[in-house]
């Protein structure tokens, strides 16, 4: 039976359909659903459409720091927009800090994620073209990656002070061994310059201003594809937090090269396995 025909009989002849529900009741129903489900049901009838515009429906879908995000990233007052408009705009993505950082709200969960470009990090010899080249590519959300030709000593680091929604977050470095290119119109990875990464593992670190500190190590994998190396997790509350992160391979007994560096990804820990980088 179709949605338009569904309903309960009243007085033996009249039928009460979904369109007869009070808008306030419909809003309560929609508030229990995910954002994609709300948008789907908004097309059912006028009552659902009107209810789907309600601030009550979208208030619980927004990240808890949405007012901070609107002021910092959109340079606007939150009261100038409906909650649905704010949600839509935060699904972005939105760039800031001279385009070196990007945040977006994951549509199905309302959770906030962040990416930090290699251009916003401190990198050993990054401006010396003997060691690094900067490659434009659609494989990065920042449309460019840094390719390491060869160095003896490598350190990459950065820091960030930001007001995250309260919760637990995972930090990853997005790296690839081998230089991406195209052959006959197909994506290939040239591994000719890859060397030195099997001798010693890379050391990763992340620390937070609230005292959390994680150190991990990993051998980089010559998969020919982008890999998100898990550095560690941190927990933050409602106050701004300062994060420092790094990777290093400083054993000068051998050179290393053939590494592509894209970005650092920070996302809620529960989204790690479902997030599309």
Image (cartoon, rainbow, N blue to C red):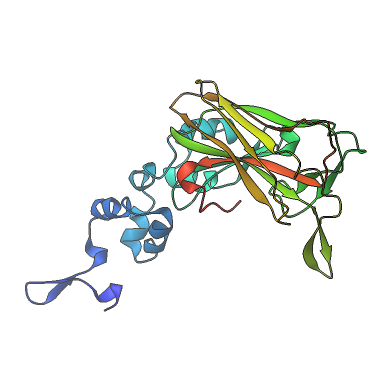
Residue 121 image position (x, y, % from top left): 72, 32
Query: Quadrant of the rendered structure where residue 133 is?
Result: top right
| Image-based side of 206 in relation to 179, left or right | left
Vertical side of 126 occupied by 179: above or below: below
At 51% across and 52% down in the image, what residue appears?
273
The residue sitting at the bottom extreme is 1
Q: Toward the viewer: 14 or 100?
A: 100
Residue 187 sits above or below residue 105 on the image: below
Total marks placed: 0
Which residue extends farthest right?
A: 130
Residue 137: x and y in percent read 78, 53
Q: Nearer the viewer, residue 46 or 67?
A: 67
Q: Is residue 163 left or right of residue 195?
A: left
Residue 207 image point, x, y percent = 57, 26
Name the residue nearer the viewer: 255 or 273. 255
- Residue shown at 82% from the left, 55% from the top: 191
18 with respect to 256 (left or right)? left
Q: Quadrant of the N terminus?
A: bottom left
**Image height check: is 10 above or below 103?**
below
Report x, y in % for residue 264. Answer: 65, 39
Q: Quadrant of residue 208?
A: top right
Whether residue 245 is situated above or below residue 148 in the rendered picture: above
Residue in the picture at 79% in, 52% down: 178
């Amino acid at each position: 039976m179709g949605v338009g025909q569904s309903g309960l009989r009243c007085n033996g002849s009249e039928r009460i359909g979904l369109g007869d529900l009070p808008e306030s009741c419909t809003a309560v129903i929609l508030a229990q659903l995910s954002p994609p489900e709300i948008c789907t049901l908004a097309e059912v009838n006028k009552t659902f459409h009107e209810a789907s515009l309600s601030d009550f429906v979208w208030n619980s879908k927004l990240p808890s720091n949405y007012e901070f995000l609107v002021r910092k990233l959109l340079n606007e007052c939150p009261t100038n927009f409906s909650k649905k408009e704010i949600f839509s705009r935060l699904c972005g993505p939105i760039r800031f800090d001279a385009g070196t950082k990007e945040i977006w709200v994951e549509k199905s969960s309302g959770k906030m994620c962040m990416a930090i470009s290699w251009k916003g990090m401190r990198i050993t010899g990054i401006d010396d073209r003997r060691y690094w080249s900067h490659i434009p590519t659609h494989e990065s959300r920042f449309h460019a990656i840094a390719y390491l030709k060869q160095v003896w000593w490598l350190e990459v680091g950065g820091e960030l002070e930001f007001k995250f929604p309260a919760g637990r977050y995972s930090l990853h470095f997005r790296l690839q061994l081998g230089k991406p290119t195209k052959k006959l119109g197909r994506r290939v990875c040239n591994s000719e310059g890859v060397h030195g990464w099997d001798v010693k593992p890379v050391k990763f670190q992340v620390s937070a201003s609230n005292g959390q500190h994680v150190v991990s190590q990993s051998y980089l994998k010559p998969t020919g594809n982008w890999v998100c190396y898990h550095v560690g997790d941190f927990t933050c509350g409602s106050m701004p937090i300062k994060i420092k992160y790094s990777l290093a391979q400083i054993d000068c007994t051998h050179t290393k090269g053939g590494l592509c560096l894209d970005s650092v990804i920070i996302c809620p820990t529960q989204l790690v396995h479902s997030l599309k980088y």
